[in-house]
Image (tube, helix red, strand yellow):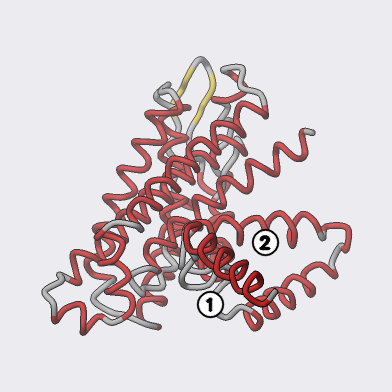
Amino acid sequence: MEFYLGLLQILGVHTLLGLSAYIVLLTGQVSMAQAGFYAVGAYLAAACTTMFGLHILPAILIAAVLTGALACLVGFPALRVKGLMLVVATLAFGEMVRLFFFNLTWQIDRTGELVGPNGAEGFRSIRFFPENGWDTADVAMFIWAVVAVVMALLYWVDNTRAGAVLRAVGHDETAAQSIGLNLTAIKVGAMAAGGAIAGLGGGIYAHTVTHIEHGVFGILLATFAIAYPILGGLGSVFGTLIAVVFVQGFLVEGLRFLGDWRSLLFGALIVVAMNLRPTGLLGERMPRLSQLLRRRSAAANKLNEAD
């Protein structure tokens, strides 16, 4: 049971990471900076609880707000370029953040013990959950409550004018600009929202693993972040969730018994999935429940007429 609850925690934090890239991808921008924002959120939230004694809720909210503000600052210069140049620029930012935490040493004495980030050794003893009596099930429920709130917010945005504006920019920037949309404000806003979600996910991640270090927040994590929404499809936030379950639940954990062969099969299955579903597992437009019901009703009517 502990294994499955731990797996639920992994799926939850990776879903937040994927959703942080989802909202940026809606504007047609491919950002590799999400791992960097995730790292900033992880270190900030860990510092709030471990060094300053805050509760987990204000800690992850502070991490989300500050990381969103950082993403906004990064977005202005980074989004002046697009395509491969944007990928390189955001990748460079992610590496800069990783190397910053590699060199960061900032420890304070708390109840006779030095706590805080310690360079290459990372940030140890992030023990808010065990020190406050949270068991694995409590942590899993907390993570999925946060995931549910974030998914509900993004789903609501997706079905309002704001979502239509984001998709309009992503489909055709020139057409969007011709009808008076401010491309810079929209792109930077999406980048800031994505950064805030990544910071939130990073803050929760730091407390589930209790020890973080710079090496975790590298290119592989950045690749996973953009792979989830692309593999799941940009038609709905649920595509990202399905992709995380497919990759982390099935490919990473479900095939663990294959040992080293798992890595080969992992890549092959991703290639097969993208060839069979080039627009993602749920496609670019997820059909609404009412549409599915109407299609089912129409098919039933045709069968009745044929009889």
Residue 15, how many percent across, how many down? 54, 52
* 49 or 109: nearer the viewer: 49
For badge 2, the amino acid type reads Val
* 105 or 85: nearer the viewer: 85
As displayed, is residue 196 above or below residue 1?
Answer: below
Residue at point 62%, 67% (across, down): 300
* 98 or 152: nearer the viewer: 152
Residue 27 visible from this viewpoint: yes
As displayed, is residue 48 above or below residue 274?
Answer: above
Residue at point 21%, 84% (across, down): 174
| Residue tagged 2 | 247
Mark 2, secondary structure of its residue: helix
Residue 99 visible from this viewpoint: no
Return the mark for residue 100.
none
Q: Is residue 173 left or right of residue 257?
A: left
Residue at point 66%, 42% (across, down): 8
Q: Is residue 1 left or right of residue 40?
A: right
Q: Nearer the viewer, mark 1 or mark 2?
A: 1
| Residue tagged 1 | 279
Quadrant the C terminus occupies: bottom right
Q: Earlier in the sequence, mark 1 or mark 2?
A: 2
Residue 290, how many percent across, how many down? 47, 58
Mark 1, secondary structure of its residue: loop
Residue 147, how many percent across, how many down? 50, 43
Residue that sits furthest to the left in the current view = 180
Quadrant the N terminus occupies: top right
Residue at point 41%, 36% (across, down): 60
Q: Is residue 93 left or right of residue 227?
A: left
For badge 1, the amino acid type reads Thr
